C-alpha cells in the first residue's frame, strides 16, 4: 500500500492506461527477447489484437526491432521482437579521487570508446575537461550518416547526490561540497546529464541487469568498499534516497568514537575501518610487526595500493593475508548494521578487496553473524561483485537507459 501524497501527485490521464501497458510490453520483450507476439500475448494473458497497437508504436519509435523468425509447426513463421540497443548510445562517466573514466557504450553495455585521465582537483576544471572529451567522442561516433544517437550522460561520483537538483552535496574523498555538476556539464555538451552516487548507480545496474537471477531480486543492498565505503539500498524495486538524499550513509556511522580518523572528520566511521587505505595501513603495521594494528596516525611515504596487497596475499605473504582478513572482519561489522536496518534478500559487495574473496569471506561472515540477532539475518547471502570498475560504468549507463523501462508513477 502506498499513501497518496496530496502535496505532490501525478494525475492519471487518458493515456496512462496505455503508458503502463506499453512499459509492461517493453519489459517483457527485454526479459524474454527474442519473443514472438503470440508468446507476448500468452505471458500477458491478453488477445493478440490488444497487443498489435502497442507493438506497432514500439516499432515505429525504433525502441523495438523485428529480427529473425521463430520455428512454427505450420504456416507463416512469426517474426521475433527484440529491444534495439545498437545505435542507442549513452556516455558513462566515473569520477574517482585519482582518475576519471569516460566511456561511450550502447544500451546493451557494449563499450565503443574509453578514455581515462587524472581527476583535476577543482570541479570547474573537471567539468571543462569532461566537456571537451565528451564532445570529441560524440563527434566521432554520432556524426551524420552513422545513425547513432547519444541519449544522455550518466555520471557517478563517490559521494552524496541530490539526484533531482543534479548537485553533489558532499563527497569527502573529492573534498567537494555542494557542487553543481549536472547543469554545468550539460551546458558544455548540450544533452541531458544525470548525476548519481556510485553505490546507487551500481545498485541500479543490478536492479536492471538481466544476468543470473538479478531480475527476481527487488530487495537488496549494494555495498561499495573502495576509496571510501558507500551503501545503496533497494526496497521493493526502488532506491531508498531519504528526505535529504543521504539515506544509506552507513559508511559514516561511527563504530567506535575513539577509532581512527575518517575523511569526514569524525572518528571510527565504518569507512575508516574498512576502506582501502585502512587495509594498506593495517598491512604496514603488520609488516612492522606492531602489536597494535591501529590504522590511525601520520602516514610515512606512499601507501601500498590495495591491488598490490591482494597480490602479495595470493603469494602467501602472511602480513598481507592478515591485513585482508582484518578488513573482512571490519566489513562484516558494518554489514550487520545494514542487515539489521533493511533485512535485504542479499548484499552485493563491490570493490578491489573482493579479489581476495577467499580471505575476507570467512571473517566477514563471522562478524556478520556476531552482529545480528536472528538466524535469517545471519544467513543473508553476501555476493562478490568482482567487476567493480565496470559496474560503476554499467551503473552510469543504466542511469540513461533504465528510465525508459521504469514503471510510470501515478498517484
Ligand atoms: Zn566518516
Image (cartoon, helix red, strand yellow):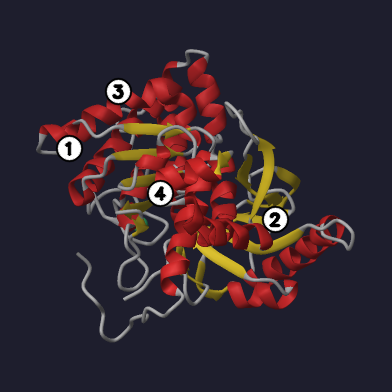
State which mark lies toward you, 2 or 3: 2
**Ligand 1 occupies quarter:** bottom left
Q: Earlier in the sequence, mark 1 or mark 3?
A: 3
Quarter holding residue 143: bottom right
Q: Position of residue 131 (x, y in %)?
A: 75, 68
User: Which residue lies at the image location 61% right of the left edge and 45% below the top edge?
Assistant: 81
State which mark lies toward you, 3 or 4: 4
State which mark lies toward you, 4 or 2: 4
Q: Earlier in the sequence, mark 4 or mark 2?
A: 4
Question: Label 1, label 3: how many angstroms apart (C-alpha)?
Answer: 16 Å
Q: Residues within 10 Å of mark 4 (few under 14, many from 20)?
A: some
| Circle 2 residue | 88
Seen from this angle, which residue lies furthest bottom? 7
Q: Is residue 130 left or right of residue 94?
A: right
Question: Label 2, label 1: how many angstroms apart (C-alpha)?
Answer: 42 Å
User: Which residue lies at the image location 62% right of the left edge and 51% below the top edge?
Assistant: 98
| Circle 4 residue | 44
Q: Is residue 15 visible?
A: yes
Residue contact at pointers 3 and 4, CB within 8 angstroms: no
| Circle 1 residue | 377
Amino acid at each position: 500500500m502506498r499513501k497518496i501524497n496530496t502535496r505532490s501527485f501525478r494525475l492519471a490521464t487518458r493515456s496512462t492506461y496505455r503508458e503502463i501497458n506499453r512499459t509492461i510490453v517493453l519489459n517483457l520483450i527485454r526479459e524474454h527477447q527474442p519473443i514472438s507476439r503470440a508468446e507476448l500475448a500468452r505471458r500477458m494473458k491478453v488477445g493478440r489484437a490488444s497487443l498489435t497497437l502497442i507493438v506497432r508504436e514500439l516499432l515505429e519509435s525504433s525502441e523495438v526491432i523485428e529480427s529473425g523468425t521463430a520455428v512454427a509447426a505450420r504456416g507463416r513463421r512469426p517474426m521475433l521482437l527484440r529491444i534495439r540497443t545498437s545505435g542507442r548510445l549513452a556516455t558513462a562517466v566515473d569520477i574517482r579521487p585519482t582518475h576519471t573514466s569516460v566511456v561511450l557504450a550502447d544500451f546493451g553495455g557494449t563499450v565503443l570508446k574509453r578514455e581515462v585521465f587524472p581527476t583535476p582537483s577543482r570541479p570547474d576544471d573537471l567539468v571543462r575537461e569532461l566537456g571537451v572529451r565528451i564532445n570529441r567522442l560524440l563527434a566521432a561516433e554520432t556524426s551524420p550518416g552513422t545513425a547513432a544517437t547519444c541519449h544522455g550522460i550518466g555520471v557517478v561520483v563517490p559521494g552524496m547526490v541530490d539526484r533531482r537538483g543534479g548537485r553533489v552535496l558532499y563527497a569527502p574523498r573529492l573534498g567537494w561540497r555542494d557542487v553543481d555538476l549536472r547543469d554545468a556539464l550539460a551546458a558544455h555538451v548540450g544533452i541531458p546529464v544525470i548525476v548519481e552516487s556510485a553505490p546507487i548507480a551500481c545498485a541500479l545496474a543490478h536492479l536492471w541487469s538481466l544476468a543470473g537471477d538479478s531480475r527476481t531480486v527487488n530487495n537488496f543492498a549494494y555495498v561499495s568498499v573502495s576509496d571510501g565505503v558507500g551503501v545503496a539500498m533497494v526496497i521493493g524495486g526502488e532506491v531508498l534516497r531519504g528526505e535529504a538524499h543521504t539515506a544509506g550513509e552507513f559508511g559514516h556511522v561511527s563504530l567506535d568514537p575513539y577509532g581512527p580518523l575518517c575523511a569526514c572528520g569524525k572518528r571510527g566511521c565504518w569507512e575508516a575501518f574498512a576502506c582501502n587505505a585502512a587495509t594498506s595501513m593495517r598491512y604496514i603495521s603488520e609488516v612492522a610487526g606492531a602489536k597494535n594494528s591501529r590504522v590511525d596516525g601520520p602516514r610515512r611515504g606512499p601507501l601500498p595500493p590495495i591491488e598490490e596487497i591482494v597480490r602479495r596475499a595470493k603469494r602467501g605473504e602472511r602480513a598481507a593475508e592478515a591485513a585482508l582478513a582484518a578488513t573482512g572482519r571490519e566489513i562484516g561489522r558494518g554489514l550487520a548494521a545494514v542487515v539489521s536496518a533493511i533485512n535485504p534478500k542479499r548484499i552485493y559487495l563491490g570493490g578491489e578487496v573482493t579479489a581476495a574473496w577467499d580471505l575476507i569471506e570467512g571473517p566477514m561472515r563471522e562478524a556478520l553473524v556476531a552482529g545480528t540477532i536472528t538466524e535469517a539475518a545471519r544467513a543473508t547471502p553476501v555476493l562478490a561483485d568482482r567487476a567493480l570498475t565496470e559496474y560503476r560504468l554499467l551503473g552510469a549507463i543504466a542511469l540513461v537507459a533504465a528510465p525508459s523501462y521504469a514503471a510510470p508513477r501515478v498517484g
